[in-house]
């Protein structure tokens, strides 16, 4: 089954361990990973995507796209808020050195939206937390769940087909915003 | 129970190699797109050649696959050809037009990796037992490499 997965960790270091573990599962033929990204939420509540894009247009696109995808992971309520907030905050990445700062979605918005998103999928990224976002094909959810639990991560899922049914991505495939390999910025050595 | 042959194994190996090459192509183009300055055109020229060669490899790998995998691979070829075309176009342009073409090439390369990855997933799910056996072998080899060379890393870094 094809799923979008968000694995929430309490710090950026463990998020990168999670990223590496996902790709190891791929190399072990346990799952197939189609793309990944790592997102952080800072103390001010802002979201930042780790990206190599230094071109403002590309960094903005990544911010908008990942914002919408994060919103979609939070369920239909989050999808609307995520796309709108990602688009609105996309311009804020101009001049940023390491890519997209995005204003999200499910829990950056109104309290009622936040509650609705939490009710739908449970996915909320708290202040100071980091998440690995991935597009995966998996025969069983147990494989990723067990590996991520060992690392202290909490896994949330939505079927890719459900996300695609929502109109927030237009003609652009949501996965295209994710790196198709285990990109790690030089600032996060593990 | 499915019987797996050496031919199955070779087919899956070939797809994994193709995916690795497609991932490298995307990495090369996205690095070029992120760069500013003189070295970029040479990088894009190299990426253009790589996209063309990869499209040919994918074309060759189509035969022997199941129908679903063939479909993904055929789409990957189309995207790779577009990536090559945009990269070649960018070399004729400068400034904004150059960067626009590079971004189009990057988008096509990303789409190509996606299709190859979907082909890999389809092929793996068609041969799960084989995939698991190969995976265990790959893990043992990887562990041996890491034990022997503790600094070895497969991570993509800028």
Image (cartoon, rainbow, N blue to C red):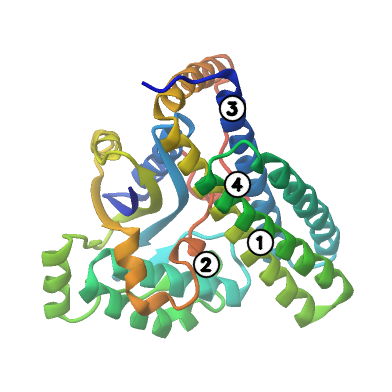
Which of the chains bears the disc numbered 4?
A: B
Labels 2 and 1 touching (C-beta < 8 A): no
Task: Describe the element under mark 2 as helix, strand or loop.
Answer: loop
Left/right placement of residue B68 relative to residue A18 reads right
| N-terminal label among 1 and 3 | 1
- Give the class, few, some or many, for how many residues have Cα within 10 Å of label 3's Cα (few <14, many ≥20): few
Tag on residue A99?
Answer: 2
- Reply above or below: B1 against B155: above
Residue bearing the label numbered 3: B152
Task: Describe the element under mark 4 as helix, strand or loop.
Answer: loop
* Mark-to-mark CA distance, 4 and 3: 13 Å
Tell me which residue sits at (49%, 32%) in the image. A27
Pinpoint residue B122: horizontal percent, then vertical percent. 47, 43
Task: Describe the element under mark 1 as helix, strand or loop.
Answer: helix
Asked whether residue A43 is in view, the answer is no
Q: Outermost residue, right direction?
A: B92
In front: label 1 or label 3? 1
Identify the image quadrant of residue A147: top left
Pinpoint residue A13: horizontal percent, then vertical percent. 38, 44
| N-terminal label among 4 and 3 | 3
Pinpoint residue B134: horizontal percent, then vertical percent. 49, 22
Residue bearing the label numbered 1: B79
Identify the image quadrant of residue B155: top right
Task: Describe the element under mark 3 as helix, strand or loop.
Answer: loop
* Mark-to-mark CA distance, 2 and 1: 26 Å
Pinpoint residue A97: horizontal percent, then vertical percent. 56, 67
Labels 4 and 1 touching (C-beta < 8 A): no
Tell me which residue sits at (65%, 48%) in the image. B22
Which of the chains bears the disc numbered 3?
A: B
Residue bearing the label numbered 4: B157
Q: How many numbered marks does the figure carry?
A: 4
Residues at discs 1 and 3 both on one chain = yes
């Amino acid at each position: 089954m094809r799923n979008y997965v968000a694995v929430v960790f309490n710090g950026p270091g463990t998020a990168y361990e999670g990223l590496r573990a996902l790709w190891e599962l791929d190399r072990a033929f346990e799952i197939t990973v189609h793309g990944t990204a790592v997102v952080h939420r800072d103390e001010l509540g802002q979201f930042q995507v780790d990206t190599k894009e230094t071109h403002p247009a590309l960094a903005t696109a990544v911010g908008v796209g990942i914002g919408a995808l994060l919103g979609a992971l939070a369920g239909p309520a989050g999808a609307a808020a995520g796309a709108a907030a990602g688009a609105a905050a996309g311009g804020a990445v101009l001049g940023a050195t390491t890519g997209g700062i995005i204003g999200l979605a499910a829990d950056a918005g109104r309290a009622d939206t936040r509650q609705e998103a939490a009710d739908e999928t449970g996915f909320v990224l708290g202040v100071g937390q980091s998440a690995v976002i991935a597009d995966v094909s998996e025969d069983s959810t147990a494989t990723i769940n067990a590996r991520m639990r060992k690392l202290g991560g909490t896994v949330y899922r939505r079927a890719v087909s459900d996300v695609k049914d929502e109109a927030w991505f237009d003609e652009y495939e949501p996965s295209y915003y994710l790196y198709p390999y285990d990109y790690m910025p030089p600032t996060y050595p593990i | 129970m499915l019987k797996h042959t050496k031919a199955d194994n070779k087919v899956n190996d070939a797809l994994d190699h193709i995916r690795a090459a497609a991932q490298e192509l995307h990495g090369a183009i996205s690095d070029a797109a992120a760069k500013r300055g003189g070295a970029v055109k040479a990088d894009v020229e190299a990426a253009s050649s790589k996209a063309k060669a990869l499209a040919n490899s994918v074309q060759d790998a189509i035969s022997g696959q199941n129908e679903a995998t063939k479909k993904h691979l055929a789409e990957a070829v189309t995207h790779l050809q577009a990536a090559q075309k945009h990269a070649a176009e960018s070399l004729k342009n400068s400034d904004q037009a150059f960067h626009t073409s590079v971004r189009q090439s990057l988008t096509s390369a990303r789409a190509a990796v996606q299709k190859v990855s979907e082909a890999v997933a389809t092929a793996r799910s068609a041969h799960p037992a084989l995939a698991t056996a190969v995976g265990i072998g790959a893990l043992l080899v990887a562990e041996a490499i890491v034990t022997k060379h503790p600094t070895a890393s497969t991570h993509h870094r800028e």
